[in-house]
Structures are given as structure tokens and as C-alpha cells.
């Protein structure tokens, strides 16, 4: 009995040391060596070098001079500690009402936008924290951002086009624009859109 207990205890300690200590340490060292930026959270800094967010987590922007991300169902909205979707299905009346209200707001706030509201601007992602928009959804917002900043829409559209990330490895995902990096680029090009930031 004592012999079996000793074997079980030794096996547990070795397993704990390997899976709870050595393996995580090796993965951390490898990640920091091969992908240092990603291993530190893909942090994004502003023109003064201050960390203003992560390229992997969306933030809410509401001022007219900034591009707005998808709606978020994470916590109270864009809450990185409460990632999650709304879990509302396509037959949900609550989802339909929320989408309609969001579409009305977007049309009101973007009177010069071309065409209908892109679907992704009224629907939350599965995580509620998707930091990207399609190039089309970003371009749809260009007239509002340009008007709020007092610049020609073509100049703002050029910033959007310059930040389009293509498919990963040429086949994975879709072309996309990171909203935080886009807003920082617009600030760098045209100045901040009002005191206090987004």
C-alpha cells in the first residue's frame, strides 16, 4: 500500500513539475523569443509612446471624428474581462430590435454614407471584442469622420486604404482594418478629434 502511494505521489509531482512549471516556462521563453510583440499582448502606443490598447481587443469609440468598431456584447461593451457574444439567435426579437435601433443611429449619424449600413456595424462578434472591420465598413464611415475633422473624404479614405491587412498567408480570413490603429493613424495625419481623445 505504501509503495503504491509513493509511486502515485512521485508521478503526481513529476507531472505537476512538467505540466505546471517546465512546459509553461518553455512556451513563454519560445514565444518571447520568436514573437516578442504578440507575447506581450500586441500593445499599441500613441504618438507620445503611451500604451493606449491592444491590437487584439476592440475599444469603443463614439466621437464623430473617429471610426467606430462593431457593437460589443462583452460586459457593458468592449469589456476585455467579460468576453462573449450576445447569444441571441436569428429569430430573437431582442436582437432584431437592437439591430434596428443601431441601424437607425448609424444612418442618423452618417447621413452622407454610401448605401445601406454594413451588417457588421450592427452585429456583435462572437467574442464581443473583434478589433477589426472590413474595408467596406470602414469606408462607409469616411464621410462622417472627414466632416468632423474638416478634411476631404478622399484624404481619410487614403488612410483607410493604407491600413488594410490582407488575408493571412493569402488564404485565411478576409481583408480587414484594425479600428484602434486606424483611429491613431487618423489622429497622426489630421490631429486629435477634440480634447480628451475618443
Image: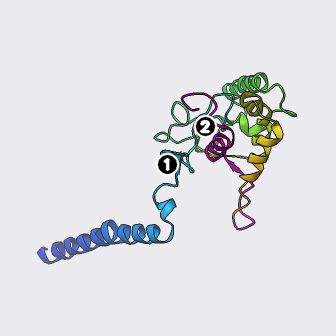
In this rendering, the label closer to the viewer, 1 or 2:
1
Question: Where is residue 144 shown, x and y percent of the image?
Answer: 76, 30
Question: Percent position (x, y) of residue 165?
Answer: 71, 56
Q: Eyeballing the image, is 112 above or below 138?
A: above
* Quarter of the image with the N terminus in it: bottom left
Q: Which of the 4 quarters of the picture holds residue 152?
A: top right
Q: How is the image coloured?
A: rainbow
> Which residue carries the number 2 mark?
87
Q: Say if 162 sits above or below 4 in the image.
A: above
Residue 60 located left or right of residue 160: left
Q: Please tell me which of labels 1 and 2 falls first in the chain.
A: 1
Q: Are marks 1 and 2 in contact (CB under 8 Å)?
A: no
Circle 1: element type: loop
The verdict on residue 192 being magenta is: yes
Question: Residue 193: percent from the left, percent from the top?
Answer: 64, 31
Label ID, residue 5: none
Q: Judge whether residue 136 can be spotted in this image.
A: no
Q: Which range is magenta?
A: 169-198
Q: Is residue 37 visible?
A: yes
Q: Position of residue 74 (x, y in %)?
A: 54, 37
Q: State the residue in front, 81 or 94.
A: 81
Residue at horizontal 69 percent and vertical 28 percent from the top: 64
Amino acid at each position: 500500500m505504501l509503495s503504491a502511494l509513493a509511486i502515485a505521489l512521485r508521478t503526481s509531482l513529476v507531472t505537476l513539475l512538467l505540466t505546471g512549471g517546465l512546459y509553461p516556462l518553455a512556451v513563454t521563453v519560445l514565444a518571447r523569443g520568436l514573437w516578442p510583440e504578440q507575447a506581450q499582448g500586441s500593445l499599441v502606443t500613441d504618438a507620445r509612446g503611451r500604451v493606449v490598447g491592444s491590437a487584439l481587443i476592440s475599444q469603443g469609440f463614439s466621437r464623430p471624428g473617429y471610426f467606430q468598431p462593431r457593437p460589443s456584447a462583452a460586459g457593458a461593451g468592449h469589456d476585455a474581462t467579460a468576453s462573449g457574444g450576445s447569444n441571441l439567435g436569428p429569430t430573437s426579437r431582442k436582437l432584431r430590435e437592437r439591430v434596428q435601433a443601431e441601424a437607425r443611429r448609424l444612418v442618423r449619424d452618417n447621413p452622407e454614407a454610401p448605401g445601406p449600413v454594413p451588417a457588421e456595424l450592427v452585429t456583435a462578434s462572437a467574442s464581443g471584442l473583434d478589433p477589426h472591420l472590413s474595408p467596406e465598413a470602414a469606408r462607409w464611415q469616411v464621410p462622417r469622420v472627414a466632416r468632423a475633422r474638416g478634411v476631404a473624404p478622399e484624404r481619410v479614405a487614403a488612410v483607410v486604404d493604407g491600413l488594410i491587412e490582407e488575408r493571412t498567408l493569402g488564404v485565411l480570413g478576409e481583408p480587414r482594418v484594425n479600428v484602434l490603429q486606424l483611429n491613431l493613424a487618423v489622429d497622426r495625419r489630421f490631429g486629435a478629434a477634440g480634447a480628451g481623445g475618443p
